[in-house]
Amino acid sequence: MAPFLLSQSMALLSLPLLVLCFLISVLVVVDASRSSFSSSASASTDVVTSLPGFTGPLPTRMWSGLVESLPGMHSHYILAECTAPPCATIAWFQGGPGASSMYGMFVEFGPLVFKGSDVKLNVNPYSWTHLANTLVIDSPPPVGFSYCDPAGPSGNGTSCGPWDDASTASVNDAALRAWAKRHPQHAANGLIIAGESYAGVYVPTLVKRLVENVHDPPPFKVLGAAVGDPCAPPAVCGVGNAPLFHVLFAHGHGQMSYKNFEAIMNACGGLSGLARLDAPSRFDGCGDALKRADVDAGKVYPYAEYDDCNHAGDPFRRRRSLLSEASEPRQWFLRRPSIVPLEEQPPPPPPFHAYPGGVASGGAPCGSLRALGAWLAEAETKTALNVPATSNFFECDNGGGFNYTLSEKNVLAIWSDLVQRMPVLVYNGDTDPGLNFYVTQNWTSKGIAGIVEREAWRPWTVDGNHRLGGFVTRYASEGAGRFDFATIHGSGHMVPAFKPVQALALFEQWMSNAFKRYAP
Ligand SMILES: *[C@@H]1O[C@H](CO)[C@@H](O)[C@H](O)[C@H]1NC(C)=O
Ligand SMILES: *[C@@H]1O[C@H](CO)[C@@H](O)[C@H](O)[C@H]1NC(C)=O
Ligand SMILES: *[C@@H]1O[C@H](CO)[C@@H](O)[C@H](O)[C@H]1NC(C)=O
């Protein structure tokens, strides 16, 4: 095991905003029966004693249960305690909108993860519980096992009404407060709010709400914020993207001949022309050159360039070509609401499998998502996770199946404020074709106010020796915060799933404010 794992609590102490202790109200433990799920639940009724698909004692203490977040709304959480408590808590929100955070806990960074299509949990040597307590919340209800009255746990995608970014931030705010009441001793060490993809909207809107509420501050300190491969309107998600970064990505990842690249540059007005959303209509021949290159580039899995799994049948995950889509304004979020009645939804995709000899990016085997889905459908899993037997596990990645409206128009303005107050990390896998690192590099370097570059783009290493993790650009803010943009070399969209070693190292190094260099 890597030596840095031994010094986690030291690392945490160097977070400048850590408050060692503060007043918390005394928890009154109600010894309730397990048959009642919300009103009389307590930390002790939420204990997870074992999990189907895993034999033997759990590697860390875990809790799972439902907290009443907003009136009539029940948010499902899972907490896995760090291996050397006390620790801060990383509170994770999956993207989507509508993706379940169970993926984070049971595929990406939790203590037990699926590693392929076998419905079997494996100890994760790179669990983030080596650094912090990890908390996942399924949001907004009815995502995952979260639900709303009166439809109850078996309700469908519309049973909690429509959502937008503001109402999602408010239910997550309430869910965290309710969780902190149930787990005051964990909440006392502070929270790092984190997430991936569409959580690039969830996280900053939630953190802003929490830290700006001076009249009713949350019962925990917000220590920092981190987002991976994030949406960041207006720079990315919600509006179309100019062709530039997709062209650079396809060219830079061996999907385009130099001849094609030159033809596009010449037809589309060079770098500055390609940076315009209207490049295909503005420059004669530009649209045709892009279309030609798009055919030549073939199709990739939009979450991981080098993934070799077969995702046919899943509309969001099958291989597609990104260039032509990128060059048209992609209004897929603005097209919401997209409510597909359950009975009209396409049948579940066939199990993912590798092409003969194929593996997902970074060597992760294919099929974890399917294994997770099968596991969550089992009655024993619901019992083990302390959710009602009638619970409908609802997932609607990319917003399909419920009514979600992108309402936050400017996340960059929120980041500009938050980087003054706390450490902020934005990271991106550099083989994620969709939300690619060129896009993220651009808005992080040009779109955030009040920061100055204190360390230009440089490699960071996993081990302080010769093992490359990725590249980091470090910024100081005028206030008490700081800001880092890091890439993870060779990682697709879901970084902890594709590059678990590097993801753990990245968080450890960010939390200890020291990105390791190459040994001379
Ligand atoms: C979705 O919610 C909005 C309100 O946020 C509402 O105006 C609209 O009618 C809803 N759409 C559907 C299909 O229910
Ligand atoms: C969801 O359930 C409600 C009743 O609770 C029903 O009216 C509605 O048609 C259902 N919607 C879908 C998409 O199945
Ligand atoms: C790069 O980022 C800046 C600041 O957010 C933005 O104005 C510009 O449009 C971005 N460039 C591209 C090509 O998206």
Image (cartoon, rainbow, N blue to C red):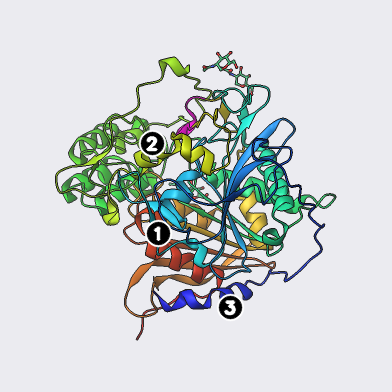
Q: For numbered disc 2, what is the local secondary structure? A: helix
Q: Nearer the viewer, residue 280 or 26?
A: 26
Specify whether 314 is left or right of 27.
Answer: left
Q: Quadrant of residue 416?
A: bottom right
Q: Nearer the viewer, residue 335 or 499?
A: 499
Q: For numbered disc 3, what is the local secondary structure? A: helix
Confirm or reject: label 1 Cβ below 8 Å from ligand 2. Answer: no
Residue at far bottom of view: 520
Q: Quadrant of the N terminus?
A: bottom left
* Callout 1 touching callout 2 (CB < 8 Å): no
| Highlighted magenta segment, given as a residue range | 395-401
Mark 3 or 2: the one toward you: 2
Residue type at mark 3 is Met
Q: Name above or below for residue 155 compared with residue 264.
A: above
CA neighbours of label 2 inside 10 A, class few (<14), some (14 to 19), many (20+): some
* Callout 3 touching callout 2 (CB < 8 Å): no
Q: CA distance from mark 1 to mark 2?
A: 19 Å
Q: Compare marks 1 and 2 and give the one earlier in the sequence.
A: 1
Q: Which mark is residue 10?
A: 3
Q: Compare marks 1 and 3 and give the one earlier in the sequence.
A: 3
Disc 1 target residue: 123
Residue type at mark 1 is Val
Residue at far left of view: 356
Q: Compare marks 3 and 2 and give the one earlier in the sequence.
A: 3
Disc 2 target residue: 374
CA neighbours of label 3 inside 10 A, class few (<14), some (14 to 19), many (20+): few
Specify whether 184 is left or right of 196.
Answer: right
Residue type at mark 2 is Ala
Q: Residue at x 45, y 61 (%)?
A: 127
